[in-house]
Amino acid sequence: MALETLGAVAATLLAAAAGLVPSGRARGLAHAAALVLTPVVLLADVWDTAQVQYLRDRPAMVLTIAAVSVAAVAMGAALVISHP
């Protein structure tokens, strides 16, 4: 439980930094880190629940979902970069 709390605090601080940091590069890195950390914290929080048991029993499905999610974010980033 403490690790999930620490992760949630870190994600919150990253989100706050994304809005407060004056450097564009640092803002982008804070956004990216918060975007990566938030689903990880959420999944860690619900990993031991009955709702996630289906995924726990199928690690290949978890890896597939993670890969598709990363690909979707990368495609969205590429679209934003190419059409500002």
Image (cartoon, rainbow, N blue to C red):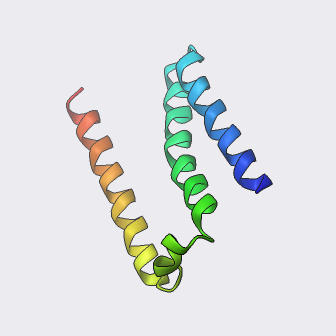
Q: Residue at x 38, y 69 (%)?
A: 65
Q: Left or right of 83: which side holds 7?
A: right
Q: Which residue is farthest front? A: 50
Q: Which residue is farthest bottom? A: 57
Instruction: Pinpoint residue 31: horizontal percent, then vertical percent.
Output: 50, 34
Q: Left or right of 51: which side holds 49?
A: right
Instruction: Pinpoint residue 12: horizontal percent, then vertical percent.
Output: 62, 34
Point out the image quarter for the C terminus.
top left
Instruction: Pinpoint residue 39: horizontal percent, then vertical percent.
Output: 51, 53
Q: Residue at x 61, y 24 (%)?
A: 17
Residue 63 sits in quarter: bottom left
Q: Look at the picture and state if 37 lies above or below 58.
A: above
Q: Nearer the viewer, residue 37 or 23?
A: 37
Q: Look at the picture and state if 1 lies above or below 36.
A: below
Q: Which residue is farthest top? A: 22
The total number of labels drawn is 0
Q: Look at the picture and state if 7 lies above or below 49.
A: above
Residue 47 sits in quarter: bottom right
Q: Which residue is farthest right? A: 2
Q: Residue at x 45, y 74 (%)?
A: 62
Point out the image quarter for the N terminus.
bottom right
Q: Residue at x 46, y 80 (%)?
A: 54
Q: Left or right of 77: which side holds 21?
A: right
Instruction: Pinpoint residue 6: horizontal percent, then vertical percent.
Output: 75, 46
